[in-house]
Image (tube, grey):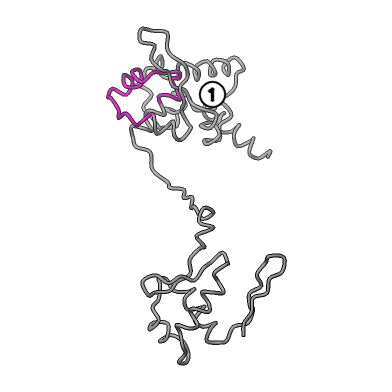
Amino acid sequence: MIKNKKKNNIIDFPSKLSQIEKEIEAIIFAAAEPLDIETIQNKISKRADVEKILMKLQNEYSERGINLVNISKKWSFRTSSKLSTLMSQEKTVEKKLSRAAIETLAIIVYHQPVTRAEIEEIRGVAFGTNTIEILMELDWVKPGGRKDVPGKPIQYVTTDNFLSHFNLQKLSDLPTVDELGAAGLIDSSNIDNAIFGTGKFYKEKQEDKKEDIYSNIDEMLSSTLHKEEEK
């Protein structure tokens, strides 16, 4: 006769199972879906009273973190309902940013603080209502006060998390329009420098110019590589 001994309110379950009991336990544990008694019977090495063994295993697992449950005459192991709150699953879902979101982010980066209307004017097209909201959800963009004009529209700026995500120390570490053109990434001849790199980014760039940091993109890249070698 199998007895469960209690000591300090802790149940000590029997550690020994018969070979058939172990087989049934293993078969249910490894199954991708709940199994009925007939299926279990066909998988074990010899005939046995499968239902009786299942009832025994169900009793032994009743107070554990994993329970043996019977649903619609099929058996499976499930996490104890008492512990269900611990089993909430977190998933990281990778999604590509839309073109509108990428363009909007780039405009905010180089023109901040900038209003929604100014973003649309620069892009030359209106964008969906969720575009900025997506960037804010990523914590790359945040409201940066209101512009002192009629209507006082909200201005948007980048966050410290934006710098952290893209491994930047400060906004002025980003390439200028001339550097992007020199690298062949854009056609700088068709871009008005007067509207590219205004606001906070422009101010940081002006400070960098005073310190004579990065006179051209080649020097910038060389400096970056030199810093990496020193680490």
Q: Looking at the image, is 49 positioned above or below residue 200?
A: below
User: In the displayed image of the protein, which residue is found farthest to the bottom?
Assistant: 46
**Magenta region: which residues?**
107-132
Direction from residue 51 to residue 65 in the image, left or right:
right
Q: Provide residue 168's location: percent of width, then percent of height.
A: 56, 31
Picture residue at 65% right of the left edge, 70% below the top: 11
Picture residue at 60% right of the left edge, 37% below the top: 225
Q: Looking at the image, is 94 positioned above or below residue 224?
A: below
Direction from residue 226 to residue 150 in the image, left or right:
left
Asked whether 227 falls inside the magenta stretch, the response is: no
Q: Provide residue 80's location: percent of width, then percent of height.
A: 52, 62
Q: Identify which residue, 171 or 33, lies in the foreground.
A: 33
Q: Provide residue 132's location: percent of width, then percent of height.
A: 38, 29
Residue at image mark 1 = 172
Where, quadrant-wise, is the N terminus in this rendering?
A: bottom right
- Which three-letter amino acid code belongs to the residue tagged 1? Ser
Quadrant position of residue 219: top right
Asked whether 124 falls inside the magenta stretch, the response is: yes
**SS type, badge 1:** helix
Where, quadrant-wise, is the C terminus in this rendering?
A: top right
Quadrant position of residue 146: top left
Q: Provide residue 185's location: percent of width, then percent of height.
A: 40, 32
Picture residue at 51% right of the left edge, 74% below the top: 58
